[in-house]
Amino acid sequence: MAKPVSIEVWNPNGKYRVVSTKPMPGTRWINLLVQQDCRVEICTEKKTILSIEDIIALIGTKCDGVIGQLTEDWGDTLFSALSKAGGKAFSNMAVGYNNVDVDAATKYGVAVGNTPGVLTETTAELAASLSLAASRRIVEADGFMRAGLYDGWLPHLFVGNLLKGQTVGVIGAGRIGSAYARMMIEGFKMNLIYYDLYQATRLEKFVTAYGQFLKANGEQPVTWKRASSMDEVLQVADVISLHPILDKTTYHLINKERLSKMKKEAILINCSRGPVVDEEALVEHLKHNPMFRVGLDVFEDEPYMKPGLADMKNAIVVPHIASASKWTREGMATLAALNVLGKIKGYPTWSNPNAVDPFLDENSSPPPACPSIVNAKALGLPVSKL
């Protein structure tokens, strides 16, 4: 029998039982569930990552829906347990769902929710922050100061790279990649080279218009180019930010061979998915190229780093915080809760999961719809006409 886990309960007499495997930011998500007669149970166990056994114990014998986290292994075992408990809804508090076996969920009739549309700007901001920190060696310099090593100004002390007039490369120019590109272009007047299977027309128009604005004001205009291959971006760009999806074609997209194509003083940023980068190859490249720098928010085998990475002074590593702004994390919690609530109440799915502002307006009630259900079509769920 599974060991009981500690919980916090809201609205104990609620008709529907909804479990959250972790405390989540804000209280709006709790209030929205309680207002619809849900008993909300929040796991307060002092464990960063819950085991399958822990989650089975949380589900129990009656559970209408679960809000989970991307660190949890949601496969056949958990969806079977949720289905047996009468549950029909699960939502990741994340836009990604690599931790979820969607086919298994569909087999058991469980809707799988995620939370897109709320992470774009905050993720792009972190990628831009890492780009600036790496280019100006801010983390190295901070450690130097804290160690009491600074004894006066020197001409060569922590000399980094100027971003203005350099070229930013974007691999994957979707919503986040394009938002990042705009920040770097408008903020630092960088030129753009990007690679994507699809043409980023809006991004191209923005760069063209901004270039014309700069030229009209007597400044050097910025330029853009859509590369014919990813390797072209790696060879040309001074700063490269990765924004692809993770699938079989993008696993170890950045490997030893591709790292060797990059400039010796290039900067590589990854706020997408850890396995996109061959981390062992990256460590070796950092060792042999001390002016090559990297900023990582995600890792190949989270929460662990490959041996040697933590010792690299030319690497900036942060613990998967791309979405960690207050507004975004509270929005993610709200969307995840509404995915579960919507399925429980029999609501249709929202027609555009990237247009979620109506769900996030705290001054009005959210639409009667599930914001984003990834297996809606497979389950035959109706689409909202709102």
Image (cartoon, rainbow, N blue to C red):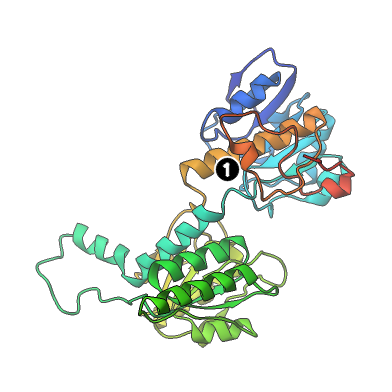
Q: Is residue 177 positioned above or below 264 on the image?
A: above
| Residue nearest the viewer, comparing 336 with 283 | 336
Q: Position of residue 192 (x, y in %)?
A: 51, 77
Q: Does residue 233 appear anywhere in the picture?
A: yes
Going by the numbered disc 1, the residue's amino acid type is Ile
Identified at 55% across, 35% down, the residue is 24
* Horizontal relation, residue 141 to residue 309: left or right: left
In this rendering, the count of numbered labels is 1
* Residue at the disc numbered 1: 49
Q: Does residue 55 appear anywhere in the picture?
A: no
The C terminus, quarter of image: top right
Identified at 67% across, 29% down, the residue is 19
Q: Is residue 40 positioned above or below 66 on the image?
A: above
* Horizontal relation, residue 138 to residue 376: left or right: left
| Residue nearest the viewer, comparing 324 with 250 | 324
Q: Residue furthest front?
A: 216
Q: Position of residue 127 (x, y in %)?
A: 47, 62
Question: To which quarter of the image does residue 36 belong?
Answer: top right
Identified at 71% across, 18% down, the residue is 37
The N terminus, quarter of image: top right
Question: To which quarter of the image does residue 77 belong?
Answer: top right
Q: Position of residue 117 (x, y in %)?
A: 63, 50
Q: Position of residue 212 (x, y in %)?
A: 47, 77
| Residue nearest the viewer, comparing 172 with 94 | 172
Q: Residue furthest left?
A: 152
